[in-house]
Image (spheres, rainbow, N blue to C red):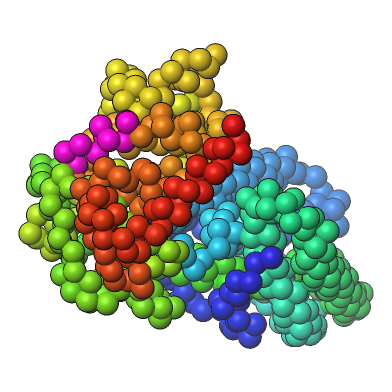
Amino acid sequence: MSSFKEQDFNNKDKKIDFSLWKKLLHYAAGFKKQLIALAFVMIGVAGIDVIIPYLTKYAIDNYVVVGDTNGLWKFGLVYLIFIAIQSINVKLLVSLAGGIETGLAYHIRKLGFEKLQQLSFSYYDTTPVGWMMSRMTSDIYRLSEIVSWGLIDLVWASTMMVGFVFVMLYHNVKLTLITLCVVPVVFIAGSFFQKRILGSYRKVRKVNSRITNDFNECITGAQTTKTLVREKENLNEFKLDTEKMRNSSVRAAVFSALFLPIVITLGSIGTGLALWYGGKGVMMQTLSYGTLVLFITYTVEFFEPVSQLAATLAEMQHAQASAERILSMIETDADIYDTEDIIKKYGDVFNPKYENWESIKGDISFKNVSFAYKNGKQVLKNFNLDVKSGETIALVGETGSGKSTIVNLACRFYEPTDGKILIDGVDYKTRSIGWLEANLGYVLQSPHLFSGTIKDNIRYGRLDATDEEIIEAAKLVNAHEFIMRMEKTYDTEVGEGGGKLSTGEKQLISFARAIVANPAVFVLDEATSSIDTETERIIQNAINKVLEGRTSFVIAHRLSTIVSADRILVIRNGKVIEQGNHEQLIKRKGYYYNLYTNQFAEEQQNELLNA
């Protein structure tokens, strides 16, 4: 299935990178007040957790041992006040931590989604969908969880431990040292187990990313899987990944299950030492009974924050991988971008300054353009082409000849590695990306519709389009008739990816969507190759109307659709080997002539066979 290898998992021995967490807190700057408030609340929670056993000591020494109940009601009132405060603290910590977790996840997902809208095509060429989905879902959830609830655990555990040690040392230094002599052993055991737990969970996260990608490929490639009868092979590959995840999860669970009993055992040893030495002190009357109870209580409770602190630090180390992956995505630089000066004048994709946008006439020129993909494959070299405003240019050639690359460069989906592309005589890099995209109409061979109604999908072309304009665009491409035959007409749900409609119907709606934007430059990328001959005839007249007066690029599979093009370019190995209109190329009897006559004969034969 997926062959993508993630390089950002190779951090098995990394310690906590505080610079990374500092950078992450920069993204949490909007929650600064809540984080500070949460820290103070947790200090209050830990402080009261330290005070409650001390109140018990006071009650034992001043009321129980002496058998005097005078003033006990005052003590009870104080005790209730602390309990009430603690209840308020717990409510506040749950509210604050939950709000930070949800808010931070929303904020980072928003940043991630914005970045994905800005990244160039080259990023999507090399990055699997499952990888991106894993970053945007489970990784962000884990990160927001550790920032919010991890802060609780760190502050609470640290305050509790400091508070316990301070009170214990204040009452009896020797008993404190004897009681806590097992703490170093706990930290050593914690380091040993957490390192192994962490290693197992890293493997879980790595395999989880693959599984997410496998799910995506299985769902999107379901038809291919069935036609190739690969169900069993896919299942076996999927089972291998899930078995790896299960084994790593079980290993982590076993280490976690062993760690807690060891901590409890060591804590019990500490409690036993406190009881042994403190008991002798009570018998010799060098230690009060209340102080012994205080030490035993503190000893029992002391190892909970110790184990919690070790677990939280390990979680931070584990979540660090998630942080690195998320930040690497958010901070990825787009290959195609506007300079600061361009943004200052024209705005960006999310905040355009329409008032400064120049109108497009439609002249497009390639000046000594060379282009190579990131994998090093050279597609164009010193390519030159002048397209006049309103001219329809058809591109013909074998697969891989460079047709789509030429169009994608003209649309600035990619940029030349050398040379310039001019629009209306100006290098298009001196204008904003949003400006060009707003003047583009693009219809793909396999149209993509978004979940929603037919009306919604047509309106995506221009969000402020009226219902009348939507209907007019549908009529122009001959989509109105089949839409009106549907039960809910324009309010019909198209399903995910347009799955409730036929390929031809989706294509017509994508035409209407492009038309409603009223673009100056129009691109048809083999837009009629996936539809039947009858549907092709329905939309061919509409295409001619649509392209009239607009600069247009048509990548054609069926040559019958481009006979009316102003100029036909025959592309081979990134070079124009023939050009002219249909009649001129037919008279030349070259590559185009052979291609056209062979395809025409094949279509005629198919029509006779299907008659």
Residue 135 in the image: x percent, y percent?
55, 60
| Quadrant placement of the C terminus | top right
Residue at figure coordinates x 32%, y 31% from the top left: 541
Residue 93 in the image: x percent, y percent?
58, 48
Q: Nearer the viewer, residue 315 or 561?
A: 561
Residue at figure coordinates x 74%, y 50% from the top left: 226
Q: Is residue 154 above or below residue 103?
A: below
Q: Nearer the viewer, residue 311 or 583?
A: 583
The total number of labels drawn is 0
- Residue 1 lies left or right of residue 235; in this view the side is left
Quarter occupied by residue 372: bottom left
Q: Nearer the viewer, residue 421 or 273?
A: 421
Residue 132 in the image: x percent, y percent?
53, 60
Magenta segment, principal secondary structure? helix
Quarter occupied by residue 376: bottom left
Residue extent of the magenta highlight = 541-550
| Quadrant placement of the N terminus | bottom right
Is-magenta flag for residue 36?
Answer: no
Quarter occupied by residue 212: bottom right
Can residue 22 be seen in this snapshot? Answer: yes
Residue at figure coordinates x 57%, y 46% from the top left: 98
Q: Is residue 56 above or below residue 495?
A: below
Q: Nearer the viewer, residue 601 or 260?
A: 601
- Residue 133 lies left or right of residue 239; in this view the side is left
Residue at figure coordinates x 75%, y 44% from the top left: 72
Is-magenta flag for residue 544?
Answer: yes
Residue 592 in the image: x percent, y percent?
34, 59
Can residue 246 be seen in this snapshot? Answer: no
